[in-house]
């Protein structure tokens, strides 16, 4: 969906009741505009995550390792559904402390799948894509990476205007996934890991959060949460007894009382 292939940014995540998310989106429409790819209705996101036999990426997130990364193949189904998908975005997502770095390249779906199996594309790539492809292949072979699970959700996205370049705020609902039928263009049953009346909101910025966004978050009583869709799906599928969906920051911030039907346990 995006032509941006390399970037560093900060990502802040929040877990919200859907009603509060709707109120935030209503306020955002005065200062931002809907992402041109999805418009007002948003778009579907399907991601296939890879991990080692010992689930190194999973446990790095759970344990809060300061430097961690993961490999995924992401697609954006259109009106024809997943079976109509023809290309995929191979992404290395890397976190160093609070900074998120991404390297991505878009390929025909069959080539993207082969790259995630450690087979470099035969086509000529420009330097940036060639370096990214080589890094992917190295990771796959060095860590014996294999498909681990698929996440899927509906996303509405808003982008900043000329004075807020790099600002992107997303709202993800209908969050589910599976650890079977691990092909992104295959129709299969997904299982929700988040209650349908809850939403994951992400605020993404290049440098700093604009003052008006900080005020907006405070006005709507948004509190930071550590959220991992990948960990939530995999833990549920494999019955791993951790709480991967929302982990409170280690800074000592206290959690509010859990609402009825807390999505962390639903």
Image (spheres, grey):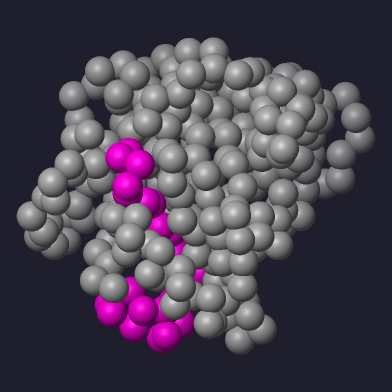
Of residues 242 and 19, the one nearer the viewer is 19
Residue 7 vs residue 264: left or right? Answer: right
* Left or right placement of residue 63 versus residue 184 in this view: left
Q: In terms of depth relative to the viewer, which is nearer, 194 or 98?
A: 194
From where the camera sits, is residue 60 visible?
no
Task: Tell me residue 103's x, y (percent).
Answer: 64, 47
* Magenta stretch holds residue 248: no
- The answer to which image quadrant residue 243 occupies is top left
Residue furthest to the right: 124
Is residue 50 shown left or right of residue 80? left
In the image, residue 213 lies in the stretch drawn in magenta: yes
Query: Quarter-wise, where is residue 111 in the image?
Result: top right
In which image quadrant can residue 221 be found? bottom left
Query: Which image quarter is the C terminus in?
Result: top left
Depth check: 223 or 187 in front? 187
Bounds of the magenta segment: 194-219
Q: How many marks?
A: 0
Residue 10 percent coordinates (x, y): 46, 63
Could you tell me which residue is drawn at 61 percent across and 73 percent down?
A: 33
Left or right of 63 on screen, residue 143: right
In this rendering, does residue 256 appear at all?
yes
User: x and y percent of residue 125 in the render?
Assistant: 87, 39
Q: Residue at x 26, y 45 (%)?
A: 246
Rendered view: 177 above or below 163? above
Q: Which residue is pictured at 39% across the width and 25% down the height?
A: 191
Seen at 40% across and 57% down, the residue is 201
């Amino acid at each position: 969906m995006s032509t941006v292939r390399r970037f560093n940014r900060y990502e802040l995540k929040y877990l919200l009741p859907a009603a509060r998310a709707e109120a935030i989106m209503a306020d955002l429409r005065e200062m931002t505009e809907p992402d041109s790819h999805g418009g007002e209705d948003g778009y579907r996101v399907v991601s296939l995550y890879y991990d080692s036999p010992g689930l190194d990426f999973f446990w790095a997130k759970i344990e809060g390792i300061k430097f961690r990364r993961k490999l995924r193949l992401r697609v954006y189904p259109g009106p024809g559904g997943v079976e109509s998908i023809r290309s995929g975005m191979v992404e290395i997502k890397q976190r160093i402390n609070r900074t998120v770095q991404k390297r991505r390249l878009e390929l025909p779906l069959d080539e993207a799948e082969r790259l995630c199996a450690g087979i470099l594309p035969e086509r000529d790539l420009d330097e940036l894509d060639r370096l990214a492809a080589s890094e992917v292949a190295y990771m796959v072979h060095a860590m014996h990476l294999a498909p681990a699970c698929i996440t899927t959700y509906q996303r509405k996205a808003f982008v900043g205007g000329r004075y807020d370049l790099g600002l992107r705020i997303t709202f993800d609902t209908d969050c589910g996934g599976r650890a079977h039928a691990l092909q992104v263009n295959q129709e299969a049953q997904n299982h929700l890991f988040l209650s349908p009346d809850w939403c994951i909101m992400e605020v993404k910025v290049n440098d700093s959060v604009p003052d008006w966004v900080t005020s907006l978050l405070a006005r709507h009583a948004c509190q930071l949460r550590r959220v991992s869709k990948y960990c939530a799906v995999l833990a549920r599928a494999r019955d791993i007894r951790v709480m991967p969906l929302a982990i409170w920051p280690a800074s000592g911030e206290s959690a509010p009382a859990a609402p009825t039907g807390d999505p962390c346990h639903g």
